[in-house]
Image (cartoon, rainbow, N blue to C red):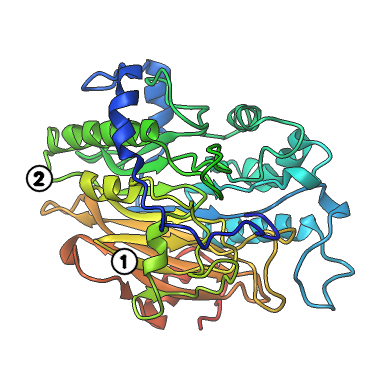
Amino acid sequence: MNLSKKIDFDTKRKMGLNFMILVVMVSWFWSIPTTCALTAKQQKSRQKLRFDQNGEFKILQVADMHYANGKTTLCLDVLPSQKASCTDLNTTAFIHRMILAEKPNLIVFTGDNIYGYDSSDSAKSMNAAFAPAIESNIPWVAVLGNHDQEGSLSREGVMKYIVGLKNSLSKVNPPEVHIIDGFGNNNLEIGGVQGTVFENKSVLNLYFLDSGDYSKVPTIPGYDWIKPSQQLWFERTSANLRNAYIKGPAPQKEAAPGLAYFHIPLPEYASLDSSNMTGVKMETYSGDGISSASVNSGFFTTLVGAGDVKAVFVGHDHLNDFCGKLMDIQLCYAGGFGYHAYGKAGWSRRARVVVASLEKTDKGSWGAVKSIKSWKRLDDQHLTGIDGEVLWSKSTSGSDGVKTGSEELNHQFASSKSQMWSVK
């Protein structure tokens, strides 16, 4: 997200352009078979991620670190008492705290990982920004925001560098696609518990897309959007995963649930307000509090049509941290994480945690995904947990998100072997 956000977004959605008509124009670039054939190396990398023996898979989302030069880069929008000593290293410390407290199975960085304009060396900034994840030996993946490429590396160069870092599961782009817009489009398959009939099935699918930086069309102002080529890749990948899931072993009646991660929010986020969301919408740079593209690419319609994605997670708007349901899809922000990113003095930096839990089969073994829950943690003295809620449940599919009470939220925190974190 641009620090000043001087671009005028008042024209957003008024243009009413729909870019889905371009799908036909890009489809000839593709040579995706009905079932994607993976190399043994690719299959092995995908099988590394699976639910643990407790039937859970936990994801830590880190949005908008805006990392630059470490201890010489000062914080923005903090209390006067914090200004003298606050630097990028506060962002590093926060990641360490989150990893120790939550012990995630996967860490997802959702763009503006570095603030290229202020970075003296993009590669060094990324080394420092991702260091806590690398040192933890926890698998991680990153998508690009609108600031990552503003330093010494191009957008492609940034993603290639990320792909080469230790424990990174990012890809420059899907290997089965010849031409696709952006960099970092990728999907990960999360296998069932080892030793069960679901161990070789992807019971949770994660999609990562490059939402771009700024519009390249002179007559269209503002931010970029997810292009038809990316949407076509998503549709075909989703369909292939659905077909594989409903077949044996352990054939299922519908697709496995999916989660999507990218940086810039979809225009549909603007339809949510305090009456139908959990969290806050405090951005003021645009009339509706959402800094999306000024045109609607139709990707939300694509998600609805695919039917498997239950929640979308973005960053970009640092002062928004809500989740709200629209047409059975949860639209979620993480809230601003980094200290060199704009924020609000006195409003804690934060991170989002998502946990998918499996159901038990009739034979007492772990089966398919039963529920997807989420909460946020604040970078305060107690690493306070807030806004616990059920984003999706197999038994209540189609109903609104259900807030979890303090007792259940405390149980989740206790299960991560944290201390007795306070819960608002």
Residue 388 sits above or below residue 209 on the image: below
Q: Is residue 193 left or right of residue 395?
A: right
Give the quarter of the figure containing the N terminus: bottom right
Residue drawn at point x = 76 percent, y = 41 percent: 125
Residue drawn at (49%, 55%) of the image: 292
Image coordinates for residue 66, horizontal then vertical, percent: 70, 52
Q: How many numbered badges does the structure rendering display?
A: 2
Q: Secondary structure at mark 2?
A: loop
Which labelled disc corresponds to residue 126?
none
- Against 364, residue 225 (above or below) is above
At 60% from the left and 63% from the top, the residue drawn is 318
Disc with the residue nearer the chain's start (1 vs 2): 2
Q: Residues within 10 Å of mark 1 (few under 14, many from 20)?
A: many
Identify the residue position indicated by label 2 in the image: 253
Percent across and percent down for residue 391 are 32, 64
Up-down relation of residue 285 to residue 68 (above or below):
below
Residue at mark 1? 325
Where in the figure is residue 59, as x and y percent of width and height? 46, 53
Q: Amino acid at mark 1?
A: Lys
Residue 307 visible, this angle? no
Q: Quadrant of residue 137?
A: top right
Q: Residue at x 82, y 47 (%)?
A: 69
At label 2, the amino acid type is: Lys
Label 1 element class:
strand
